[in-house]
Amino acid sequence: MKLALRRKPDAIWLLSDNITGSGAYQITQDDLLATFAKEKQVTHTTSVPIHTIQFIYPDPLGTSKAIADAHGGVHRFVSTDDLSIAR
């Protein structure tokens, strides 16, 4: 995300199947939202929308939607049915 913001994009699309991670890569929703907000301030990209796409697994905390809502983006959940993946 830092690299993407430093490139001064018009928009960012964040794709994930587990936005808050697990184990060594786990981050809380509050910490993730704070990190995005801080990076946007540092890089002077506060007006850049962050759109989110959550793939396959529902986001029980709503973190992807919270990111999109906080940063002027649109959130979309893409299920296995949407991808035509056999279960």
Image (tube, rainbow, N blue to C red):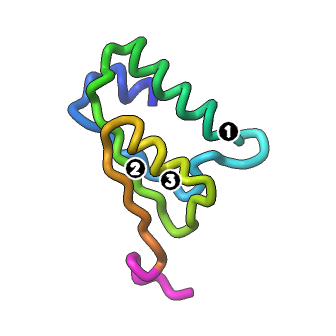
Find residue 44 and report its image quarter.
top left
Q: In the rendering, at what x and y percent does residue 49 appear?
A: 30, 36
Please report the residue visible at 35 percent of the width from the left and 39 percent of the height from the top.
50
Q: Is residue 14 above or below residue 7?
A: below
Looking at numbered disc 1 in the image, what kind of residue is underneath it?
A: Thr
Quadrant where the C terminus sits is bottom right
Packing grade of label 1 (10 A; few <14, some 14-19, many >=20) is some
Disc sitting over residue 1 in the figure:
none
Q: Do callouts 3 and 2 mark residues in contact (Cβ within 8 Å)?
A: yes
Residue that label 1 marks: 28
In the picture, the disc for residue 16 is 3
In-image side of 74 versus 54 (left or right): left
What's the distance in space between the residues labelled 1 and 3, CA to CA? 15 Å
> What is the number of the mark on residue 52?
2
Residue 83 image offset from top left, x and y in percent: 40, 76
Q: Report if residue 36 lies within the magenta region.
A: no
> What distance separates the C-alpha of mark 2 from that of mark 1?
17 Å
Q: Of discs 3 and 2, which sits in the foreground?
A: 2
Residue under the image location 63 percent in, 30 percent down: 31
Q: Position of residue 40 (x, y in %)?
A: 39, 21
Tell me the kind of residue under disc 3: Ser
Residues at discs 2 and 1 in contact (Cβ within 8 Å): no
- Indicate the amino acid at tag 2: Thr
Q: Quadrant of residue 1?
A: top left
Up/down of 53 relative to 29, above or below? below
Disc 3 element:
strand
**Which is more N-terminal, label 2 or label 3?**
3
Where residue 14 sits, quadrant-wise, is top left
Judged from this view, the residue extending furthest toward the bottom is 86
Q: Viewer-nearest of labels 1 and 3?
A: 1
